[in-house]
Image (cartoon, rainbow, N blue to C red):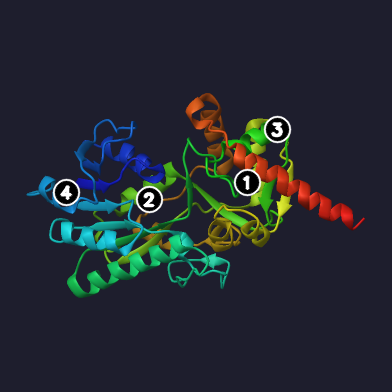
Amino acid sequence: MKILFIGGTGTISTAISKKLVANPENELYLLNRGNRNNIIPGAKEIIANIYDEADVAKKIDGMYFDVVAEFIAFGVESLERDYRLFNGKCSQFIFISSASAYQKPVGHYLINESTPLCNPYWEYSRNKIDCEDYLNSVYRNAGFPITIVRPSHTYDERNVPLGVHGKNGPYQVIKRIIDGKPVILHGDGTSLWTMTHNSDFADAFIGLLGNQKAIGEAVQITSDESISWNQIYDAIGAALGKEVKRYYVPSDLLAKTSDYDFEGGLIGDKANSVVFDNSKIKRLVPGFCAKKPFSVGVKETIDYCLSHPECQTEDPEFDAYCDKLIEKLDGVVESFK
């Protein structure tokens, strides 16, 4: 297959790209600005800024793709551009949406593709919903061959997946655990969440490429393993060989006491207890099943993080925020004694 990825070097797309180039029957093109160092050996690059539509049109002139996958579109205007660029130039257009677009608060704990899309708490999710609406309209009205994919919390070896962290990523939380300091956990840690390793996501995604049964469909790809946030942090602690001192803070309080986007990321996503029904992806890709349990995947991620200094970006601002919030909440508790 001749495949074009718009993006191709992110958490999700890197794993897919590596698996695709391992198969000599695939010809993979990555369209990006060429600014990142994590080049995928075996992939061909089209160096361009996707926002420069005229330049991209010149560079893909005369090319036809079996699949075009869009990993970095976050608004309808980007997809309107993609439609102009790739209508008539591909047999399948795959858009990466988000499972955060599903109804919040949840109407039922079990989530499948028929769950309503509505998230008043997170603009990111609402933009993804608008993108899906646009693509469904060009599929219905013009026959543009779309497939919509909804990932949930997907992680790789470079980023430890957490519920609450600062703007510089997860390392400051890991450092707090190593140093024996309390770490903030939203709610009481009992809500259920799903972590999906990017290698498992890649297996399912590749099964959708060129899959005619997936045309016009929306499909979620997640692990079947649903675990509580307490269990998630226990697994992180076990990987570090450290006790995790959890400090529970209500999600709505976190949203009101910081400049971080905890309203969208928590109330609009991670604070909700969800279980994903993956029957549809298993029907479209027979034999698919996520294989890597979180306890194994996060151990690999922790080991990678601790052995790669570039993953150890400290965040003094977030560290100070945690200390200040914990001190103030402890003071409130003491005042009632």
Residue located at (55% from left, 44% from top): 161
- Label for residue 232? 1
**The residue under label 4 is which amino acid type?**
Val
Residue located at (23% from left, 52% from top): 68
Q: Is residue 300 above or below residue 216?
A: above
Question: Which circle's residue, 1 or 2, is located before the other in the chain?
Answer: 2
Q: Secondary structure at mark 2?
A: helix
Q: Secondary structure at mark 4?
A: helix
Question: Which circle's residue, 2 or 4, is located before the other in the chain?
Answer: 4
Is label 1 in contact with label 2 (beta carbons under 8 Å)?
Answer: no
How much space separates mark 2 and mark 4, taking CA atoms? 29 Å
Find residue 291 and report its horizontal and vertical position in percent.
48, 44
Find residue 332 and report its horizontal and vertical position in percent.
82, 55
- Between tags 2 and 3, which lies in front? 3
Q: Is residue 112 above or below residue 67?
A: below
Question: Which circle's residue, 2 or 3, is located before the other in the chain?
Answer: 2
The residue carrying mark 3 is 242
- Label for residue 204? 2
User: In the rendered view, does 176 fall on the left or right side of 165?
Assistant: right
Q: Is residue 209 visible?
A: no
Q: Is residue 40 above or below residue 63?
A: above
Q: Between residues 245 and 264, which one lies in front from this camera angle?
A: 264
Question: Which circle's residue, 3 or 1, is located before the other in the chain?
Answer: 1
